[in-house]
Amino acid sequence: MFVVECKVKPKPQQIQAIDEAIQTSQFVRNKVLRYWMDNRGVGKTELFRYNTRLRKEYKFVDDLNSHACQTAVERVLRAINKFFDNCKKKIPGKKGYPRFKKNTRSVEYKVSGWKLSENRKHITFTDKKNIGKLKLIGTKDLNYYQIEQIKRVRIIRRADGYYVQFSIQLDPRDTVEPLIPSQKAVGVDVGLKYFYADSQGNIEPIPQFYRKAERQLNRANRKKSKKFRKGHKQSRNYHKARCRYARKHLRVSRQREEFAKRKALRLIQSNDLIAYEDLNVKGMVKNRHLALSISDVGWSLFRGWLEYFGMKYRKVTVAVPSHNTSQNCSNCGQKVQKSLSTRTHVCSCGCILDRDVNAALNILQKGLSTVGHTGSKAFESEILSTLATANGGEDPSTLIGVILSEQASSVNQESPRMRGWGVSIIYSDNPPGDNNDQ
């Protein structure tokens, strides 16, 4: 699916109608979930039949488009299936038991209940909620797609207004031209000192969007808290302060996402293979001393965009285990114990490297030696075909050998990329071995 999002500016009566449609969708979801809890063993058919009973019993549910009510049932089914899958996989901790929703922010239509204008600049919702006609604001042109390709239409409420999303049945790879193979591979090591350091010696500074906006966020939160009245209906001033606070958080999240998207796209466009660490971010944020910094840097977001752009531009993305990538020497493979405060890797073989660059070289070596164990959005056949394309149709192993040989230079040769760092990189004549893995 390919998603196109446009902003809309509804009138006050339209805002009320949209909010009522969202609340109705939430009501259907919660009622269906309660029915499943009270009648264990019921399946998909029984849940959809109960949805039909709700439409006959409640007038405001019948006013919502029938497909929008069905999508609310589908949300319950996804939550139930995810819970049972987690139980079967014996995932440690909580398994994600389905829970009731109280702050739903979207309502989703299928192929009915809406109609686009001839110029595709307006959308009209035709159910009995009386949302009416909305103008689509943005640079995306829906004239490039057929009406039959639009499978879902979603209205989303955010802190800064309302948006309409179109889910289009289209492979994102068909929307871009194939890139010229660069015949390059790179290993990427993410961290808290730098956003990432790659095996080519490039370092990207960490942006720290939340840290920079933390003072303003705390001030806005205090103003919101002062207007809160416990046990009473909240005033309009409280809701205004709450919206101002939410908009500031939304701005930080958008900055973080755009930064991750831009850096991921640059890596994908300039390399044919990108290796990165398979980090357990969910477990790492349990460290209360580093949780805020890890959440601010957005490692999972960066990985998600890497995998998406890799699929879109037909590039290889490889997730490798992170065990000892910072401890092992990228030159000889010897394990050199170092604490987090030690930022320079110094090995007895004479290799002196920045800690993160050394880790990136180890990640690249693991990625090249385990081609085929890829991220969630790539497949082994695509890896081999992409490498063959980058190598002019020859055996993929030829390209791997070229990449590995380029990583090694003559003894005691200083890398020009590292001259400004005050440290030197020293390689041996042989590429790093496979003894990095533990």
Image (cartoon, rainbow, N blue to C red):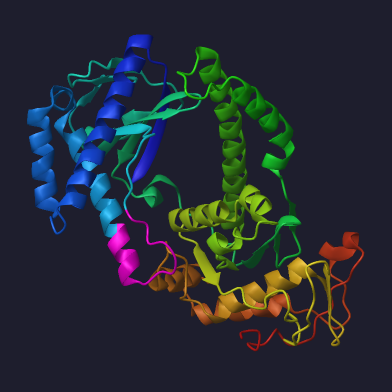
| Residue for point 89% across, 63% down | 419
Residue 149, placed above or below residue 372? above
Q: Is residue 296 above or below residue 246?
A: below
Q: Residue at left 22%, top 25%? A: 114
Q: How many marks?
A: 0
Does the segment drawn in magenta span residue 93? yes
Q: Residue at the top extreme? A: 12
State the residue at coordinates (62%, 44%): 259
- Give residue 11's position: percent from left, percent from top: 37, 11
Q: Magenta stretch? A: 82-97
Give percent across and percent down for residue 402.
Answer: 63, 78
- Direction from residue 334 to residue 352 in the image, left or right: right
Of the 4 image quadrants, the one containing the C terminus is bottom right
Query: Does residue 56 appear in the picture of this structure?
Result: yes
Of residue 18 and residue 268, the one placed in the foreground of this image is 18
At 64% from the left and 47% from the top, the residue drawn is 296
